[in-house]
Amino acid sequence: MTASGQPSSLPAPGLREVATIWWDVERDPIVTWTDGAVFELADPEGGGRLELARFDPPPEDPRAVAAVLADGLAACDFPPTGDGASPANVAAALRAAGRSERPG
C-alpha cells in the first residue's frame, strides 16, 4: 500500500482479454494489492475488479507476486462464475515462476 493509503498496482497488459470479457472495456487492466495479502485484477478507470489471490501470511515481496500474476495468468484461468482467478491456476503460475507462496 502506498503512503496515501491507496493500493499498489502494476500494469497487466497480458490480461486485457479478461478486461474485455468481464468489463467490456478496451484497455489494459492492473493488478492491485492491499497490505500485500489481497491481489485483484482491476480496471484502472474503476470499471470492475476480480480477485486473483489471498495470502496468509502476506508474501515478503508483494510486487514480485503481482508481476507473476500479471504475466503468468491468462483469460482461461478465470472460470465463468465471476469469482476471479482459479486458485489452482494461481498456484501453478507462482510455481512456474519459482515462487514459494501459495494462496490460501
Image: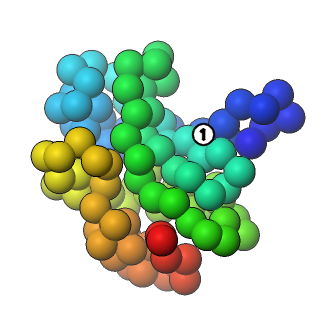
Q: Position of residue 24 (x, y in %)?
A: 21, 20
Q: Nearer the viewer, residue 34 or 73?
A: 34
Q: Is residue 5 above or below residue 65?
A: above
Q: Residue at x 60, y 39 (%)?
A: 9
Q: Is residue 97 visible in the rendered structure shown here?
A: no
In the image: residue 49, left or right of residue 10: left
Left or right of residue 97, residue 89 in this image: left
**Apparent side of residue 90 relative to residue 63 in the rendered image (left or right):** left
Image quarter for residue 76? bottom left
Colour scheme shown: rainbow
Residue in view at x 47 percent, y 16 percent: 45
Local packing at callout 1 (Cα closer than 10 Å; few below 14, some 14-19, many 20+) is many
Q: Relative to 61, say whether 38 is above or below.
A: above
- Closer to us: 22 or 61: 22
Numbered marks: total:
1
Amino acid marked by disc 1 = Ser
- Location of residue 100 with respect to 61 vertically, above or below: below
Tell me where residue 92 sits by quadrant. bottom left
Observer-nearest residue: 40 or 72? 40
Quadrant containing the N terminus in the rendered view: top right
Residue 16, position as x, y percentages in the image: 29, 35
At x 56%, y 66%, the residue is 55
Horizontal and vertical percent for residue 101?
Answer: 55, 77
Q: Is residue 31 visible?
A: yes
| Residue 59, quarter of the rendered image | bottom right
Query: Going 28% across and 47% down the picture, which residue do you hit?
Result: 83
Horizontal and vertical percent for residue 39? 52, 50
Residue carrying label 1: 9
Badge 1 element: strand
